[in-house]
């Protein structure tokens, strides 16, 4: 079982920045991939960014060049640095951990943190 606690959401004007944090209850070195998803009202949850333990990163096209995902294995925390925010980035952001347990891939989720971009 993995608990994920997120922080860092809030309201910001277009062009501003926010940094989201997600701290895991276990060593993230044992987690295959950590990522951030988001869900806007009336839309499906979508992958924003992910990073594997080997360092492979993946970004949604809509955030490339603006968002950066990073991991701190000492603090067991993954970050999402969001720059040049746009109103369309408004959503609830969820931290995700994907881990291989026995022979199954399991996904764990944080509680979500609201990001609102508005003037």
Image (spheres, rainbow, N blue to C red):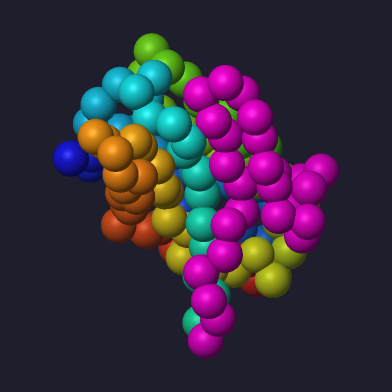
Q: Is residue 77 visible?
A: yes
Q: Could you tell whether 107 is left or right of 66 in the image?
A: left
Classify 13 as above or below 19. below
Query: What x and y, as percent, mark residue 115?
Result: 52, 61
Tell me the residue at 25%/26% (across/down).
Answer: 26
Specify the farthest residue to the bottom: 42
Query: What x and y, as percent, mark residue 46?
Result: 57, 64
Tell me the residue at 52%/86% (across/down).
Answer: 42
Q: Which residues are magenta?
A: 42-67
Q: Could you tell whether 49 is left or right of 9 in the image?
A: right
Query: What x and y, as percent, mark residue 4?
Result: 29, 42
Classify 22 as above or below 16. above
Q: Is residue 116 visible?
A: no
Query: What x and y, as percent, mark residue 68?
Result: 67, 37
Task: Depth check: give the residue in front, 85 or 106.
Answer: 106
Task: Depth check: give the residue in front, 118 or 97.
Answer: 97
């Amino acid at each position: 079982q993995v608990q994920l606690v997120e922080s860092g959401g809030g309201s910001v004007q277009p062009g501003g920045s926010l940094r989201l944090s997600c701290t895991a209850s276990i060593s993230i070195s044992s987690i295959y991939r950590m990522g951030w998803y988001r869900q806007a009202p009336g839309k499906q949850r979508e992958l924003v960014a992910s990073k594997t333990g080997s360092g492979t990163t993946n970004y949604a096209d809509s955030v490339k060049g603006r968002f950066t995902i990073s991991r701190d294995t000492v603090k067991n925390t993954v970050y999402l640095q969001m720059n040049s925010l746009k109103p369309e980035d408004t959503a609830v952001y969820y931290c995700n951990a994907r881990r291989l347990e026995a022979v199954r891939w399991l996904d764990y989720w944080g509680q979500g943190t609201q990001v609102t971009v508005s003037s």
